[in-house]
Amino acid sequence: MKPLGPLRLGVNIDHVATVRNARGGDTPDPLRAARIAQEAGCDGITAHLREDRRHISDADIEGLMEVLNVPLNFEMAATEEMQKIALRHRPHAVCLVPEKREERTTEGGLEVAREENRLAHFIAPLRDAGCRVSIFIAADKRQIEAAHRIGAQVIELHSGAYCDAHHEGRIEDRDRELEALREMSGFAHGLGLEVHVGHGLTYETVQPVAAFPEVMELNIGHFLIGEAIFRGLQPAIAEMRRLMDDARG
């Protein structure tokens, strides 16, 4: 199968805000990072407004909506507060993610199958407002089917287990997780869902995923912000873009 189209890169700027908030004040500025990412050729910016505001702030979202020339992918928990914020700003895309206050980062996919009815009613106003609704889920057929039934237009498959297994040298687990991502990408596409992948991707792990023809977008943040310390944000993004394009080609 030939790729369905060009592979987009969404850059997550959450951890620029993490560094800023560690000290307080205004620097480093996530909006500046977003502008650099645009100049480096990213196709969108992702920002997760957590309930505890541990990194991205309400003011950051306000600023991003004003300055971005590329789409904003607004990650959020499925809460009434976040729904109101999304409906006020009407970003290009809303991605529903699970959220626990005690976690360091998003640890898994959203449990859609157990909350189908609630989530179907939750996303309806977002779709009516013109937001593309994405659901961040594990590479699991049951969850994908549920996301399709509730009316999501996009799924983002959680690649964390694959990336963790790779970096820990668990080759059999890595290959099994990669195969699950491949199979479920094809399955979701067959249902009419647009397929994105994200979480934990690095220069070492991105190309096998980028080669999946059904995958239309990768969302990458923590690694790129960390790599920017050593080579700068624009070169870090440019290298990721090069690897993705090589794999796609």
Image (spheres, rainbow, N blue to C red):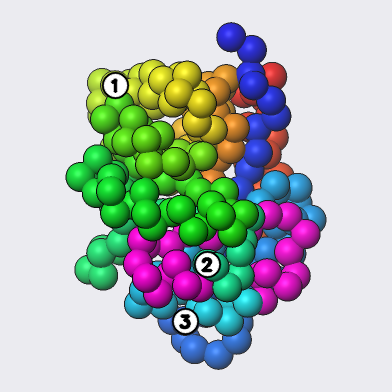
Q: Residue at x 47, y 72 (%)?
A: 84
Q: Which mark is residue 86?
A: 2
Q: Quadrant of residue 140?
A: top left
Boundaries of the magenta span: 63-85
Q: Which mark is residue 176?
A: 1
Q: Position of residue 106 (x, y in %)?
A: 33, 55
SS type, badge 2: helix
Q: Quadrant of the C terminus?
A: top right
Q: Position of residue 213 (x, y in %)?
A: 57, 20
Q: Position of residue 129 (x, y in %)?
A: 59, 59
The amino acid type found where label 1 is placed reads Arg
Q: Residue at x 29, y 54 (%)?
A: 118
The amino acid type found where label 3 is placed reads Asn
**Who comes first in sequence, dot 1 or dot 3?**
3
Q: Residue at x 43, y 70 (%)?
A: 82
Q: Which mark is residue 21?
A: 3
Q: Quadrant of the N terminus?
A: top right
User: Can you say whether 86 is above or below 153 in the image?
Assistant: below
